[in-house]
Structures are given as structure tokens and as C-alpha cells.
């Protein structure tokens, strides 16, 4: 039987809309609903589909169901903090491997180093804006 799905398939008659051009999925993990909504708005403007989790434990559970392309991860949260969540996510050996960007007010070098050594791909200081986020995502080749 021949598969109907092909990497060069197009959607909606748009010749440039291939599987490679489908929106990426980002899980925003932050205990602040304001930060989640703000981040979601920025990411949607960059053609991301977004999901939200209010703490690290919820993020781990969400990633058991669907592996995001990107995870924006706060450090200081109840239930499970960002660093513990980061370590748990990396231990899960998710495939494909999501990019994880720590988004936090923790801005001292030892904390940044700790997160990068634990498996974070990038680090963004709060507060951030669309340009800062877009630049980080461009470095990760997500936009």
C-alpha cells in the first residue's frame, strides 16, 4: 500500500506550504498566567501553536502526550521548579528532542551555567520582548 503522505505534499493549494513549513508547537511553562498569555501572543505572531503548563510537573505530563518543538521554561514555580523539570525532560529522552529555553529572572552566571549544563539550549532574561525572543529562536533555527 502506498502512503498518501509525502514530504513534498502541499496544503490548501499553497505550493510553499509543505510539511517543513507547518507551524511549530511550543509549550510555555510558567506559574504566571500573565507571562503565559504574553508569551503565547508573541509566539503566535511568529506562527507557533502554543500550549501552556503552570508548573514543571504539568509540563512533564504534557510532554508524555505530545513532544513540543520548543519549551519556554520558567525557573521559579510551585510543584516542580524549572531546573528539576529541565532535568526530568532531558532524562525522558524525548524524540524529537525539543529545544528548551529557560525564561527567568535568575540572571546570575552560576544559575545560567547550571541550566545550560542541565540541558537548556538557551536562556532569556525576564522581562523580554518580541525581538529578544525572535533573536533567540533564530539562533536555535526555529524561526
Image (cartoon, rainbow, N blue to C red):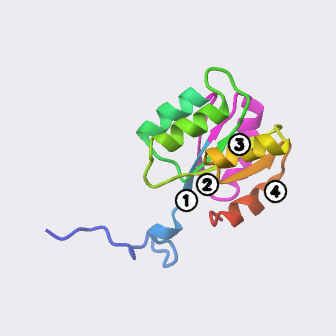
Q: Position of residue 69 (x, y in %)?
A: 54, 53
> Between 114 and 68, which is closer to the camera in this rendering?
114
Disc 2, disc 3: CB below 8 Å? no
135 shown above or below 15: above
The secondary structure type at the circle numbered 3 is helix
Classify mark 4: helix, strand or loop: helix
Badge 1 local density, few (<14 within 10 Å), some, or many (20+)? Answer: some
Which of pointers 4 and 1 lies earlier in the amino acid sequence?
1
Measured Cα–Cα span from mark 4 to mark 1: 20 Å
CA–CA distance in space, label 4 to label 2? 16 Å
Tell me, for residue 114, which label it has, or none: 3
Quarter assignment of residue 7 = bottom left
Quadrant for the C terminus in the image: bottom right
Q: Which residue is drawn at 63% across and 28% down?
A: 55
Are discs 3 and 4 less than 8 Å apart at CB?
Answer: no
Give above or below for 111 relative to 70: above
Give the number of the disc on residue 46: none
Name the residue beneath numbered marker 4: 132
Residue marked by disc 1: 23
Q: How busy is the neighbourhood of tag 3: few (under 14 within 10 Å), some, or many (20 plus)?
A: few
Q: Distance between the residues labelled 1 and 3?
A: 31 Å
Q: Which of marks 2 and 3 is nearer the N terminus?
A: 2
- Label 2 and label 3: CA atoms lie apart by 28 Å
Counting other residues with Cα less than 10 Å from the Cα at mark 2, is it few (<14), some (14-19), or many (20 or more)? many
Say which of marks 4 and 2 sits in front: 4
Magenta-highlighted residues:
28-55
Amino acid at each position: 500500500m502506498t502512503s498518501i503522505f509525502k514530504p513534498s505534499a502541499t496544503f490548501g493549494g499553497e505550493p510553499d506550504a509543505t510539511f517543513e513549513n507547518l507551524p511549530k508547537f511550543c509549550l510555555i511553562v510558567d506559574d504566571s498566567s500573565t507571562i503565559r498569555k504574553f508569551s503565547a501572543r508573541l509566539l503566535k505572531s511568529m506562527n507557533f501553536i502554543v500550549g501552556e503548563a503552570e508548573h514543571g510537573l504539568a509540563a512533564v505530563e504534557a510532554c508524555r502526550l505530545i513532544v513540543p518543538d520548543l519549551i519556554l521554561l520558567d525557573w521559579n514555580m510551585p510543584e516542580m521548579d524549572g531546573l528539576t523539570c529541565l532535568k526530568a525532560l532531558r532524562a525522558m529522552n524525548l524524540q524529537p528532542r525539543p529545544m528548551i529555553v529557560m525564561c527567568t529572572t535568575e540572571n546570575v552566571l552560576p544559575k545560567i551555567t547550571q541550566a545550560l549544563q542541565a540541558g537548556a539550549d538557551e536562556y532569556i532574561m525576564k522581562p523580554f520582548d518580541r525581538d529578544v525572543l525572535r533573536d533567540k529562536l533564530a539562533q536555535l533555527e526555529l524561526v
